[in-house]
Amino acid sequence: MIDQHSPASGPGRPKDPAKREAILNAARLLFLGNGYEGSSMDAIAAEAGVSKLTLYSHFKDKEALFCAAVKSTCETRLPRRLFQLDGRPIAAVLLEIGQAFQSLVNSPESLGLHRVMVALAAHNPQLVRMFYDAGPQQLLDDLERLFAQAHAEGRLHAPDALRTAEHFCALIKGGLHFRLLIGRDEAVDEACAQRQVADAVAFFLRATQPA
């Protein structure tokens, strides 16, 4: 995922990547368990086993830490290499992206973050926008570039690459994501989820087949 929208960290270059990762892990754990407003920087530092000085040397404030936690999750689950065509069949590329995206959005971590954002939507819209820019928007940007390239090469019909990216994400989510989000379903059947992704990609390719 790209870095252009990510919030700035604290001053200077982080001295210890392991401590940064510990902070991000602690932030994810507490934000999901206690919500955004119920998670203090003191508690995150204690959970990570670092001092507040160390915490603030990596992240300037709680908003920056929250967005970094979202961004790092997306980068780990949807690495940049997935969005490179590199001469590969477009179906194989989309299946790999679709499976990784489905796994991410239906994970307990992602579902928890989604619920936190819905709860904050009415009284902290700025944070919700930051969350969207750090996570979902980055995915759409990557897909938009991929589909624009595929369209230019005649491999897909996608004159509006951003809209095509939004359609692709909606197809991959299907009905399963909403059922998990509201607790209608409690767990993902992996075989069923993989079939759903394969069906969605096949439908997408038929809809975007070059003339």
Image: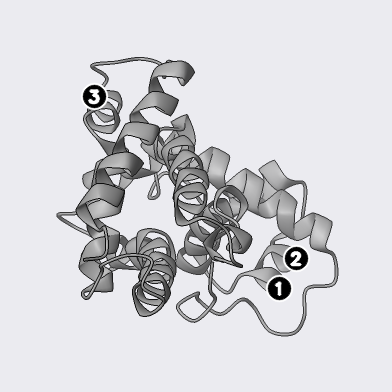
Tell me what residue is drawn at x 23 percent, y 31 percent: 178
Residue 148 sits in quarter: bottom left
| Amino acid on which disc 2 is placed | Thr
Q: Mark 3 Cα within 10 Å, few/some/many (few <14, many 20+)?
A: some
Q: Is residue 119 left or right of residue 22?
A: left
In the image, residue 73 above or below residue 190: below
Position of residue 40 measured from the top left corner of the image (x, y, whole percent)? 51, 51
| Amino acid on which disc 3 is placed | Arg
**SS class of the residue under badge 2?**
helix
| Amino acid on which disc 1 is placed | Ser
Q: Which residue is mark 3?
A: 179
Q: Earlier in the sequence, mark 3 or mark 1?
A: 1
**SS class of the residue under badge 1?**
helix
Q: Residue furthest front?
A: 211
Q: Earlier in the sequence, mark 3 or mark 2?
A: 2
Tell me what residue is drawn at x 40 percent, y 70 percent: 150
Q: Which mark is residue 57?
A: 1
